[in-house]
């Protein structure tokens, strides 16, 4: 320990002695380690701590149902009950259904996201109450029998002022009144990864909390809506549990056959669940972690070159220590101690970066129709990760210089001889520089491809006009409206809003386009079409008011739009998308054909242009529209097209809605363009991160080229002086130095092109409108990188041109 302490003190003195080099190295490492630590804090929130406040979250799994077309569905409620009661590999399985809920009444009513859960959910997750008690199985036995609710800590503090006497008080939830029996721990946000949920009611209160019909008593095995979490019994491996659950699902399928279903019960790890933010964010953060790691390696390569240059300057010092009896192992340890000290300083600076990033990103709400919240808090895991990365970085960039420094020829070094060949023989420095340039080119190619992809996606025609459209959500189901009064309210609100100054048109729809996740579907049979074996005949659908297509400016291809004739007493009708008509009635008119869904035969009255329903990059898909008057639902979104700026009409529209019902909560008020931002989120995040990483790597590569060439000029001062004394012209010296730098950059570009061709294949699934190996992109980036390399060589090359032969010959 005493020897180590001596190494630390000596290393600290050396770092203080060379403050300029130390400062550059610390800033370089702070960026590299800081980027890795920041991404790790966000990745931790969905991988290592996916459910805050839950005990043993790594032991949890999800049970899904899969269709023969490859889609993953939630479980059927009755399949869940059978699996819960008759399996021997799971210690527990609980179900939930995240829903938006209206709480409170009158003008104090508000919209929050909550969760309808089975009574065993909190026991399965090991969640403890902060106040009162949580739901139990006894609260979930009789439909409508236990009107109780648990609220989150944040809702308790925000809405009820942290009142400790809240237990036992009533709270309006949906159309019913429920008694608050408990408050969850502060960290707990619900059973969905990355979602922030605030009200928890028993599954048996589903009809009162969310009037969607009776989902828990109908014994309908075709309705898949329940999200499940399961915990394995002690000693049962995941593969054993997976096989047993799948076998039980096959047994259920024999009892209740369904040709559409492939696996009725399939166990998957929580990290691979298609539900929750990890399904979208985990792939993004995983790629970001790889990119951040690559940038850190570039930084380490740059620092290795700096340390190698310092090692050349310290040759005499190293030779003296070797001559006095220091062994190579002792010397390498000393030099590595200096490197690790330097990297720890960089890691300390990186922690400041990650602390800022944690405060910035933690609790940050993603522009999404769902309550997605990032978890990016600084904790002991983040500190340990930063410490580990710092130590490894110090070893990575310090090991090669330390090893080379210990191989010093004593006699020349003690005589302070400077060999002009020293630099030319340093293949290590050359190799590190070439590697920096290569990696920089690969990152820049990936960033450029993503920039072009984002531009291509933003130019995609979604099939509707999103300019100057405001969105206003409301849910009549939880405000006491039945179908008759709800239809009357819809007619009144459309009439009143359409008459407002500055409003061009208004319409209602149950679903918004470009949802990214969660498109509802229903089965249908098509007149004159015989499905192939196991063909999936489920289609996305929407319920829209008259005037919807005109308001959204969706083009009519054939027939007519919905109008006032299509009310609840009129014959049932449907409008289909153009891909639907082409798929099932090719070469003939679709108008007048019959489509049967939910047991009702409907006549096709129109065909409309295809719209992007989930993603801007999706392929055209069959889709159907039902008239809202004939297919009433209480939760809709009002679409209002303004004559001018969309946001300017928001206050007037909300005033008009509350003029009809002052207690009706209006939620998710935003423009259609703001709603569409969620569909572009992945491309924007990937573009920004890759661009920053690519520019950072380019900057490091340019500094590396400058440093290597400048060091080369310093080492070859005597040689350059002799050349000029023998008649070499400044232009020839300039070409010599520039040629050396250009050759190194060209070698890096050649290697970088090979790396780019391999690495861009990873991005292929994200690219749109451009190939992963687009030659123009590669040529443009390579050319730009060579220009930057030549610019980095220019300053040391000009310095070499001005070397005085007389001064150079006296240099030694």
Image (tube, rainbow, N blue to C red):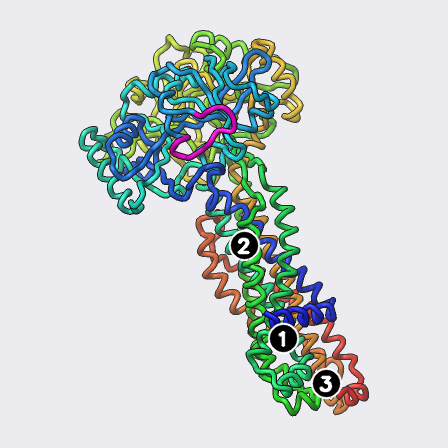
Report the front residue among 630 and 260. 260
Which residue is drawn at the image coordinates 43% and 15% (left, top)? 147
Q: Image quadrant for the C terminus?
A: bottom right
Mark 2 residue crowding within 10 angstroms, few (<14) / some (14–19) / many (20+): some
Residue hosting label 2: 385
Residue hosting label 1: 308
Residue 111 percent location from the top left of the image? 54, 21
Which residue is drawn at the image coordinates 69% and 68% (left, top)? 12
Q: Image height check: is 105 above or below 525? A: above
Q: Image height check: is 546 above or below 306? A: above
Residue 579 percent location from the top left of the image? 38, 33
Range covered by the magenta-colored residues: 122-134
Which of the two discs, 1 and 2, sits closer to the camera? 2
Q: At numbered mark 2, what does the secondary structure look like: helix, strand or loop?
A: helix
Residue 392, by quadrant, is: bottom right
Marked residue nearer the N-terminal end (1 or 3) = 1
Mark 1 residue crowding within 10 angstroms, few (<14) / some (14–19) / many (20+): many
Report the front residue among 187 and 168. 168
Marked residue nearer the N-terminal end (2 or 3) = 2
* Count of numbered marks: 3
For marks 1 and 3, give the CA distance: 22 Å
Is residue 228 visible to us here? yes
Which of the two discs, 2 and 3, sits closer to the camera? 2
Residue 29 forms part of the magenta stretch: no
Residue 131 forms part of the magenta stretch: yes
Report the front residue among 595 and 538. 538
Residue hosting label 3: 720
Residue 53 percent location from the top left of the image? 48, 36
Tell me, yes or no, whether the two marked residues, 1 and 3, touch with CB atoms within 8 Å. Answer: no
For marks 1 and 2, give the CA distance: 27 Å
Q: Image height check: is 550 above or below 42? A: above
Q: Is residue 515 left or right of residue 496?
A: left
């Amino acid at each position: 320990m005493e020897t180590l302490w001596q190494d630390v003190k000596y290393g600290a003195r050396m770092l203080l002695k060379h403050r300029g080099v130390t400062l550059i190295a610390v800033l370089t490492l702070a960026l590299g380690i800081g980027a890795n630590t920041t991404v790790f804090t966000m990745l931790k929130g969905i991988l290592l701590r996916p459910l805050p406040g839950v005990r043993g979250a790594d032991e949890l799994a999800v049970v899904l149902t899969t269709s023969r077309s490859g889609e993953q569905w939630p479980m059927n409620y009755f399949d869940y009950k059978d699996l819960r009661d008759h399996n021997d590999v799971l210690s527990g399985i609980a179900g939930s259904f995240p829903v938006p809920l209206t709480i409170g009444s009158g003008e104090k009513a508000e919209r929050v996201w909550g969760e309808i859960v089975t009574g065993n959910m909190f026991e399965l997750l090991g969640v403890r109450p902060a106040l009162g008690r949580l739901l139990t199985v006894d609260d979930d036995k009789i439909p409508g029998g236990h009107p109780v609710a648990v609220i989150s800590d944040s809702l308790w503090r925000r809405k009820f002022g942290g009142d400790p006497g809240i237990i036992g008080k009533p709270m309006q939830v949906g159309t019913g009144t429920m008694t608050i029996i408990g408050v969850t721990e502060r960290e707990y946000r619900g059973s969905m990864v990355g979602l922030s949920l605030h009200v928890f009611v028993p599954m048996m209160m589903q009809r009162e909390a969310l009037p969607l019909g009776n989902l828990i008593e109908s014994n309908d095995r075709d309705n898949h809506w329940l999200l499940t979490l399961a915990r394995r019994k002690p000693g049962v491996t995941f593969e054993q549990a997976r096989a047993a659950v799948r076998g039980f699902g096959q047994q259920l399928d024999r009892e209740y056959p369904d040709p559409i279903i492939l696996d009725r019960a399939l166990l998957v790890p929580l990290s691979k669940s298609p539900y929750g933010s990890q399904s979208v964010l985990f792939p993004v953060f995983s790629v970001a972690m790889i990119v951040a790691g690559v940038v850190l390696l570039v930084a380490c390569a740059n620092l290795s070159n700096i340390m190698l240059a310092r090692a050349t300057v310290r040759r005499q010092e190293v030779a003296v220590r070797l001559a006095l009896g220091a062994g190579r192992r002792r010397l390498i340890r000393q030099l590595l101690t200096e490197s690790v000290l330097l990297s720890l300083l960089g890691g300390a600076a990186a922690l400041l970066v990650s602390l800022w990033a944690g405060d910035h990103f933690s609790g940050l709400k993603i522009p999404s129709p769902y309550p997605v919240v990032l978890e990016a808090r600084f904790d002991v895991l983040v500190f340990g990760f930063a410490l580990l990365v710092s130590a490894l970085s110090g070893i990575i960039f310090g090991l090669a210089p330390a090893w080379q420094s210990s191989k010093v020829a004593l006699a020349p070094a003690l005589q302070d001889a400077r060999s002009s060949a020293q630099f030319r023989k340093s293949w290590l420095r050359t190799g590190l520089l070439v590697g920096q340039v290569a990696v920089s080119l690969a990152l820049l190619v990936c960033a450029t491809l993503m920039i072009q992809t984002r531009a291509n996606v933003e130019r995609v025609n979604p099939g509707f006009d999103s300019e100057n459209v405001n969105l206003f959500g409301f849910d009549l189901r939880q405000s006491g409206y039945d179908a008759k009064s709800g239809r009357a309210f819809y007619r009144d609100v459309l009439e009143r809003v359409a008459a407002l100054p500055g409003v061009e048109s208004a319409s209602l729809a149950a679903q918004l386009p470009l949802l990214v996740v969660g498109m509802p579907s229903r089965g249908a049979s098509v007149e004159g079409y015989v499905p192939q074996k196991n063909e999936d005949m489920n289609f996305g659908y929407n319920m829209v008011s008259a005037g919807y297509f005109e308001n959204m400016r969706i083009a009519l291809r054939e027939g007519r739009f919905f109008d006032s004739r299509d009310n609840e007493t009129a014959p049932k009708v449907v409008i289909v998308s153009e891909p639907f008509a082409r798929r099932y009635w090719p070469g003939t008119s679709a108008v007048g054909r019959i489509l049967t869904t939910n047991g009702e035969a409907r006549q096709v009255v129109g065909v409309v242009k295809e719209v992007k329903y989930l993603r801007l990059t999706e392929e055209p898909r069959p889709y159907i529209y039902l008239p809202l008057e004939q297919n009433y639902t209480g939760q809709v979104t009002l679409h209002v097209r303004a004559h001018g700026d969309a946001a300017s009409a928001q206050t007037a529209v909300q005033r008009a809605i509350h003029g009809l019902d002052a207690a009706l909560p209006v939620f998710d008020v935003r423009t259609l363009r703001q709603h569409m931002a969620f569909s572009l989120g992945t491309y924007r995040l990937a573009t920004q991160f890759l661009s920053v990483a690519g520019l950072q790597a380019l900057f490091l590569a340019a500094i590396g080229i400058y440093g290597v060439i400048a060091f080369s000029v310093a080492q070859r001062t005597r040689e350059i002086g002799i050349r000029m004394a023998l008649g070499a012209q400044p232009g020839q010296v300039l070409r010599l130095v520039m040629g050396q730098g250009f050759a190194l950059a060209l070698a890096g570009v050649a290697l970088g092109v090979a790396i780019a061709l391999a690495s861009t294949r990873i991005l292929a699934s994200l690219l749109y409108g451009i190939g992963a190996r687009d030659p123009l992109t590669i040529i443009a980036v390579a050319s730009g990188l060579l220009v930057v390399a030549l610019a980095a060589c220019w300053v040391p090359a000009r310095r070499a041109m001005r070397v005085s032969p007389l001064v150079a010959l006296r240099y030694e």
